Image (tube, grey):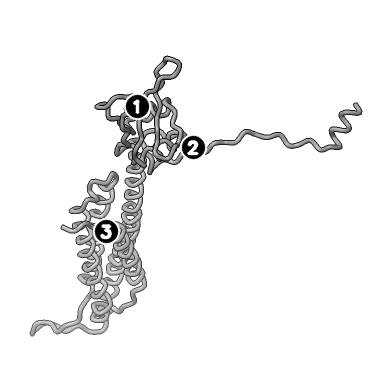
Amino acid sequence: MPSLNLPEQAQQVRDLAHEFEALRARVRGVSYTPGTDALRQIGPLLLKTQDLTATLLVRLGALANSPYTHVPGSHASLECLSSLILASTLAGNDLANALHSNPLEGAPFPGYRADNASDRLARHATAIPRMTGHLTDAAHQLDLSATGCHYVATGIIRDLADAQANQAKSAQMDAGPALSPAQYDALKALSLGQGRLYESSQRGLGVTRVGTADGTRVSIATYRALAKRRLVTVDTSTSLFHGQKITVTGDGQRAQAQHRPHPVTPPAVAAPVPATSRAQKARR
């Protein structure tokens, strides 16, 4: 199954929120006359609500079967999206109840008295408050659906950002402390190859030194710090007097790529004293 574009899914959920908002405005502003006109005006609102409910179900299924479920915080978003299916379904139920309360016109069975104008007015007077109540409830459920979609869309983006930040933080922690300028320069020089650790005799004492291809001076203390962090290894199969090859490890290459040397703060330099001030002090 191809990986899901989660930012795109978040945008689609946000688009759903706008559709619920538009539908809520239509329900609140619907104008009708009980009977056939009400059926004509309210029927499309019910169909649109059912369509949005089906789309919500598709979005929930896509997210629930995606890697998003492994992202911390995704459970709350999925639970909210599930509750929105209920809210939009209740909105559709309210619209269906409004249509059920709508008095339709039709001829009675033979032998029954046909309705007159006063009968129809009485039925309309009874039906209108019921229909208005159901439409108000439907608008409320649509409002909840819109708000919830905004919440889910924002939650997906927030969860992804938090997960990426945590991954970056973990990578930084795995990389270890930042390199000093001397360590950074040493890794850079040793990465060129031909780095050697050798021992020479000086005044009868053995002195261990590090040689580099480009002549960069690397102190033995800097080398040992790199070796302790396993950023470099040395081939001990040869003698120190002949030189042991130094190799930058994979961790060393990553450390060099990820770290930048700490900036060296230059010592503060006192501002020069003007000549007139020196002359005044000399007279004192």
| 3D distance between C-alphas at marks 1 and 2 | 20 Å
Tag on residue 5? 3
User: Residue 135 falls in which quadrant of the image?
Assistant: bottom left
Residue 140 in view (yes/no): no
Q: Quadrant of the N terminus?
A: bottom left
Q: Quadrant of the C terminus?
A: top right
Q: Amino acid at mark 2?
A: His
Seen at 37% across and 30% down, the residue is: 226
Seen at 36% across and 45% down, the residue is: 165
Which dot, 1 or 2, sits closer to the camera?
A: 1
Which residue lies under the disc numbered 2?
A: 262
> Which residue occupies the foreground of this view, 267 or 9?
267
Looking at this view, name the residue that lies furthest to the left. Answer: 110
Which residue lies under the disc numbered 1?
A: 228
| 3D distance between C-alphas at marks 3 and 2 | 38 Å
Tag on residue 80? none
